[in-house]
Image (tube, helix red, strand yellow):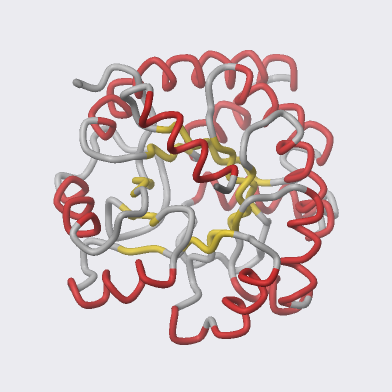
């Protein structure tokens, strides 16, 4: 069983959803991003998404774009991302890289999978890579025991969901809304329906992302999903903080709130 599968199994055994927190590597600096990710884990985040900053994101809203731009201006590289994933893995929490396909392709498909595995990383989410174009990636991740996570959306047909889920390992990422990332005041009503449709196609865990920002929203999604993904809400706190120390305290407080939320689900 991979560390990612174990994290979902542990959460399931405890009668709750897994909490997945996202931060871009290199934001606000390489060292500080690793520090903030460790703080998230210490306060109850089960799995960390380590974002690979990219200059041309397709699905990232303005908050994540601002953080990614700051990381890129600081010179963050894919090698830094892999190293930070390794630091997260040392905490005992699985580290999953979130990356658009172009940086992985430019780095070297096999090299990226191999080096991430060697560092202790568990998987990669590739939001803009389709199963039909993932032959080289499937071969590389299979060779190095790295989980592949693809996305499905409310617009996906049942046939498409089945095709995507068949190529996933680790979990299936269910985007709760059509559009870009960003914290929202409410979670899309389509999320529960999408999770049910994915569950009809696979036994893999299903994690819901895009829009979660509060413990109440996390509790709502935990009623029907195996994982709750939170990113923009953490990033906004860091952007608004006057110092890294202040940012860390805010990140810790939100992580505690969200961790309590995913444990509020009904049996």
Q: Image quadrant of residue 157?
A: bottom left
In front: 267, or 38? 267
Instruction: Identify the residue at image location x=20%, y=45%.
Output: 188
Total number of numbered discs in the rendering:
0
Instruction: Identify the residue at image location x=53%, y=36%.
Output: 21
Q: Is residue 224 left or right of residue 115?
A: left
Is 143 situated above or below 92?
below
Quadrant including the C terminus: top left
Is 236 situated above or below 141?
above
Is 262 situated above or below 205?
above
Residue 243 at x, y = what percent?
Answer: 74, 20
Furthest residue in direction front, as rendered: 1
Q: Image quadrant of residue 100?
A: bottom right
Is 84 situated above or below 215?
below
Residue 43 at x, y = what percent?
Answer: 57, 17
Instruction: Identify the residue at image location x=14%, y=45%.
Output: 189
Residue 213 at x, y = what percent?
Answer: 39, 30
Q: Is residue 215 left or right of residue 239?
A: left
Instruction: Identify the residue at image location x=76%, y=55%.
Output: 72
In front: 238, or 107? 107
């Amino acid at each position: 069983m991979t560390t990612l599968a174990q994290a979902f199994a542990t959460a399931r055994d405890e009668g709750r959803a897994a909490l997945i927190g996202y931060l871009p590597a290199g934001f606000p600096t390489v060292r500080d991003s690793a520090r903030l990710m460790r703080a998230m884990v210490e306060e109850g985040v089960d799995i960390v998404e380590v974002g690979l900053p990219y200059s041309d994101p397709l699905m990232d809203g303005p908050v994540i774009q601002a953080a990614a731009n700051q990381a890129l201006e600081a010179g963050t590289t894919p090698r830094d991302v892999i190293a930070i994933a390794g630091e997260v893995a040392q905490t005992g929490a699985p580290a999953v890289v979130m990356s658009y396909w172009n940086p992985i392709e430019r780095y070297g498909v096999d090299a990226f999978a191999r080096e991430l595995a060697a560092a202790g990383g568990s998987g990669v989410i590739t939001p803009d890579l389709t199963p039909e174009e993932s032959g080289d990636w499937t071969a590389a991740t299979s060779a190095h025991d790295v989980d592949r996570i693809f996305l499905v959306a409310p617009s996906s047909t049942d046939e498409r969901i089945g095709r995507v889920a068949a190529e996933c390992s680790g979990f299936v990422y269910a985007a709760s809304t059509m559009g870009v990332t960003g914290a929202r005041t409410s979670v899309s009503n389509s999320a529960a329906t999408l999770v049910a449709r994915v569950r009809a196609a696979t036994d893999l865990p299903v994690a819901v992302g895009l829009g979660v920002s509060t413990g109440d929203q996390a509790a709502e999604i935990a009623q029907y999903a195996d994982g709750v993904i939170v990113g923009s809400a953490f990033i906004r706190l860091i952007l608004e903080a006057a110092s890294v120390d202040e940012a860390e305290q805010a990140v810790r407080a939100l992580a505690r709130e969200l961790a309590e939320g995913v444990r509020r689900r009904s049996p």
